[in-house]
Amino acid sequence: AQCALFRQAGITWARDCSFEWNQLEPIEGQLSFKNSDEQVGRSLSEGFNVMALLPVFPSTKWCSSAPPNLEELVQISPFSYSCYPPKDPAPQVNFITKSIGRFGDRIHHWEYVNEPMTYYSFPEAKDKMPDANYTDSDYVKWLKIAYETMKKADPSCAVMGCIQASPMVYAKEFINAGGLKWVDIYSIHP
């Protein structure tokens, strides 16, 4: 009953993870929003406000900057290639632009990638991922691109950036790297 009251008041949020780029566009140019349409539609039909991760992980296998022989180097997980940023920002810009073009009338809050500085998003050297030594400055560089792309697609949208762990370390590094300039909302996931 309390959840229904919150929804009625418009203060209940759903954090949507259906914009997993590698699932929506596993082959370059073959983009389908079928899963996102269903997930977002379900949340909205229940009266939730939606804040979506866009994209959930920085890349797809077909445009990842991960080492080409990643399977040989680590025990592969479904998002191992996706955790590295793209080789070139253009495909990510295209994906973000198309996503907001399709959902911008329903979603007005977007978070750029899930929990950077972890083994599944902009991994650090300590995460034992090959050629992965990403820092807050790397994340801020990509956040800037995403922020500018999102604002171009929908100037009224709110863009969230986040830091996952060790807030006393990473939050300071994020701020020192100029990250606050590229967010409307800043989230820390300790």
Image (cartoon, rainbow, N blue to C red):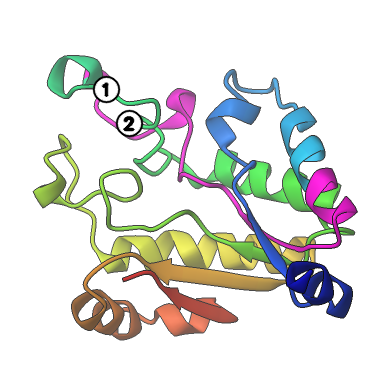
**Residue drawn at point x = 50 percent, y = 67 percent:** 144
Q: Is residue 172 above or below residue 85?
A: below
Q: Secondary structure at mark 1?
A: loop
Crowdedness near tag 2: few (<14), some (14–19) or many (≥20) residues, C-alpha within 10 Å: many
The number of discs equals 2
- CA separation in Å, label 2 and label 1: 6 Å
Amino acid under label 2?
A: Ser
**Residue drawn at point x = 44 percent, y = 25 percent:** 61
Mark on residue 80? 2
* Residue 24 found in image quarter: top right
123 sits left or right of 62 in the view? left
Name the quarter where the C terminus is drawn: bottom left
Dot 1 corresponds to which residue? 76
Residue 50 lies, in percent from the top left, at 73, 61
Amino acid under label 1?
A: Ile
- What residue range appears in magenta? 41-69
* Residue 151 found in image quarter: bottom right
Name the quarter where the N terminus is drawn: bottom right
Q: Nearer the viewer, residue 56 or 90?
A: 56
Q: Nearer the viewer, residue 105 or 155?
A: 105
Crowdedness near tag 1: few (<14), some (14–19) or many (≥20) residues, C-alpha within 10 Å: few
Question: Marks 2 and 1: CB-CB under 8 Å?
Answer: yes
Say if the magenta span includes residue 141. no
**Residue drawn at point x = 43 percent, y = 69 percent:** 162
Residue 157 lies, in percent from the top left, at 75, 71
Residue 146 lies, in percent from the top left, at 57, 60
1 sits left or right of 90 in the view? right
**Residue drawn at point x = 56 percent, y = 80 percent:** 185
Residue 49 lies, in percent from the top left, at 78, 66
Q: Secondary structure at mark 2?
A: loop
Mark on residue 102? none
